Image (cartoon, rainbow, N blue to C red):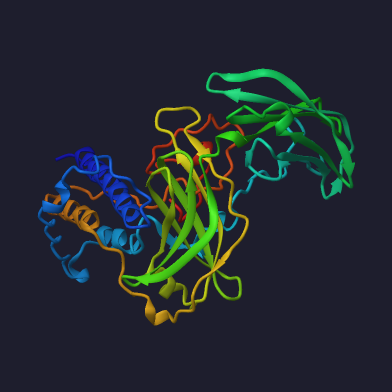
Amino acid sequence: MSGSGARARVAAAIGVAVLAVLAASAWCGRGSAGLRESARTADAPDASAAAPPAPAPPPLPPEDELPEPVRDYLARTVYPPDAGRLDQAGDLLEANPRYEQFKRVPGSHGSVPDVTFLWTADAFRYTSDEIVHARFEAKQGDAPALVRDLSGWARAEGRGGPEGDEVALHFRRAGAAHLADVDLSREFAEHHGFVVLGVRYTVADVAQQEERIRVFVTPADAIPAAFTGTFRDDVRDGSLVVEAGVEVYRPGFYRFDANLYGANGEPVAWAAFKGELSRRDGFVPLRFFGRVLRDVGAPGPYRLRQLRGYLFRDGEFPDRLHLRDYEGSYVTSASALDAFSEAEWDDAHRRRMVELMLQDEAAGIPIDVPPAPGADGALGAAPAPDAPGPASAPDGASAPDGASAAPGAR
């Protein structure tokens, strides 16, 4: 078998894993205050109840008998796809960040010192009843640079490109910065998707330049669910499970993310939930994996913060409706570290991946180490300047809203 054949087998196994993760997420939802509602009728028999249990996966060979690529894969999959260490996923420390930084003004490469600019906003995701606070700043070296001919605009963007007319931005000075506000409720109340913010400027001896950024807008009247502010937690199977109350307005496939911090505010863990929710009040379970808590070494109580989520809309554009982020926090019950399991994540897919890799190794086929699974599409990332728009599957195969996903949070 060729190396490409081996890669195809690994890719197929990864596809099976995605389905397994979705099924597991849906199963978690069934046991959480009736959040899932079966597709079958109330009086129909439960066919799954009579199904025999799946056979246990075979045990892995001893570690010292495994090839190095297999050992590497196992070392990178100690945690499950829906949980991980927060201190190793820096992008997740902010729930709704932007990533613009000062960069060189185009055409100024001969300038000494460098002429740089920053065009950014205070967040990436908004609802249409909020105000975007945009900021432009230019520097030559470390000193503020004189900005001339500054103007700006905002415009809705759809699947096919720009929509509607440009809305002028009005700047005001605040020290070295030039600030402009965009009241989404006035111009973009019904728009769902990207709004492009553009700025035109002249600085130093460089000809007029133009720069653009995007924000993502969910109409206020289309928000699909809301956090109730009710929480509960307990230790299950060696992991901490925090259940967050949710009022669901639109049933469908949801994703929720949250961060966990220690008693002194240190980042501890992140967790994600993905699954079907019905139109009713209930609780969404977020499992903070026991091995993660043991590895970080921070005992409870913990503070859950930065709770956020969205409804995935398969085949539609945009492909998600965001909830309003939960602005509060929740303190869990106190718990000692030995309440949590030291066991690493293990399931049939992980063992199957090892089995395929060992088969390839025995056949003399170079082993292509598969990527570590994870919670792709962790909420909060901002898009690249020319990101085309959201195009991800419900398992989070790509980052949200054309975003660059956070390391460790995939």
Residue plotted at (37% across, 43% down)? 395
Q: Locate residue 201 relative to residue 50 in the image: left or right.
A: right
Hey, which quadrant is residue 103 in on the image? top right
In this orientation, does residue 209 appear? Answer: yes
Foreground of the two, 295 or 313: 313
> Does residue 217 appear in the picture of this structure?
no
Q: Residue, x 58% and y 30% (percent of image)?
A: 192
Foreground residue, 146 or 361?
146
Above or below, 334 relative to 276: below
> Could you tell whether 401 is left or right of 144 in the image?
left
Residue 253 image-quadrant placement: top left
* Residue 362 in picture, x, y percent from top left: 12, 54
On screen, residue 334 above or below 224: below
Figure check: 214 above or below 344: above
| Depth order, front residue of 48/118 | 48
> Across the whole image, how many numbered discs are drawn on residues?
0
Q: Quadrant of the N terminus?
A: top left
Q: Residue at x 85, y 34 (%)?
A: 171
48 left or right, relative to 404: left
Examine the image and state in which quarter residue 33 appears.
bottom left
In the picture, measured across the screen, residue 235 lies left or right of residue 101, that is left
Q: Position of residue 406 (x, y in %)?
A: 51, 51
Q: Residue furthest front?
A: 43
Give how far across and how far down residue 272 sits, in percent. Answer: 43, 54
Give the x, y percent position of residue 351: 20, 58
